[in-house]
Amino acid sequence: MAAERAKKEAAEKEQEVMKQKLQEQQQQMEAQKKSLEENILQLKEKMEKERENIIKEQTMMLEHKLKVQEDLLNEGFKKKADEMNAEISNLKNMINNAKKDASHWIEKALDVFSVMCLPGNPIVRGIESLIRKKK
C-alpha cells in the first residue's frame, strides 16, 4: 500500500515537473517568436529606407541629367542631348521599377523565412537536433 502511494506520488511529481518544463518551453518559444517578429520588422523598415534612398539618388541623377541636357540643347549639341535623353529614359524606368516592385520579393522572402524560423517548426527542430548531436 505504501509502495503504491509512493509510486503514485512519484508519478504525480514527475507529471508536474514535465508540465512545468512544457510551460517553460512554451514561454521560451513565445519570446523567440516575438524577438523574430521584431527583427523582421526592423529589417523591413531598413530595407524600405534603403529603397527610398535609392529612389532619391536616382531622382537627383535624373534632375542633373535633365539640366545637362537642357544646357547642351541651348549650346547647340543636339547629338549629345539625344544621348542624354536615352540615359534619362533609362533612369526614369529604373526609378519607376524601384517604386513599383522593389520590396515585394523581399517581403515574401522575409515572410517565408519568419515562418521557417518559428520555434516548433519541424524544420527548426530538425536543424536543432542536428546541432545538438554535433555538440
Image (tube, grey):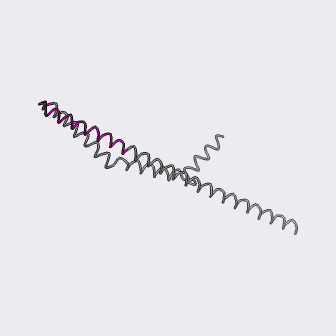
Check the image and report above or below for 41 versus 62: below
For the record, the magenta segment spans: 51-79
Q: Is residue 121 visible?
A: no
Secondary structure mostly taken by the magenta-highlighted segment of the chain: helix
Residue at 62% across, 57% down:
27
- Figure disc tally: 0
Q: Quadrant of the N terminus?
A: bottom right
Q: Is residue 38 magenta?
A: no
Query: Does residue 2 lie above or below 81 as drawn?
Result: below
Residue farthest to the bottom, as pictured = 1
Residue 119 point in image, percent of width and height = 57, 53
Q: Is residue 58 inside the magenta stretch?
A: yes
Residue at (59%, 54%) from the top-left corner? 31
**x, y percent for residue 99:** 31, 48
> Which of these two is toward me, 62 or 110?
62
**Which quarter of the figure is the C terminus placed in?**
top right
Position above or below: 36 against 56 = below
On the image, the x and y values in percent for residue 131 come to 61, 43
**Image position of 70 (left or right of 96):** left
Whole-percent x, y for residue 22 in the image: 66, 59
Residue 86 visible in the current orientation: yes
Furthest residue to the right?
Answer: 2
- 123 sits to left or right of 53: right
Q: Quadrant of residue 132?
A: top right
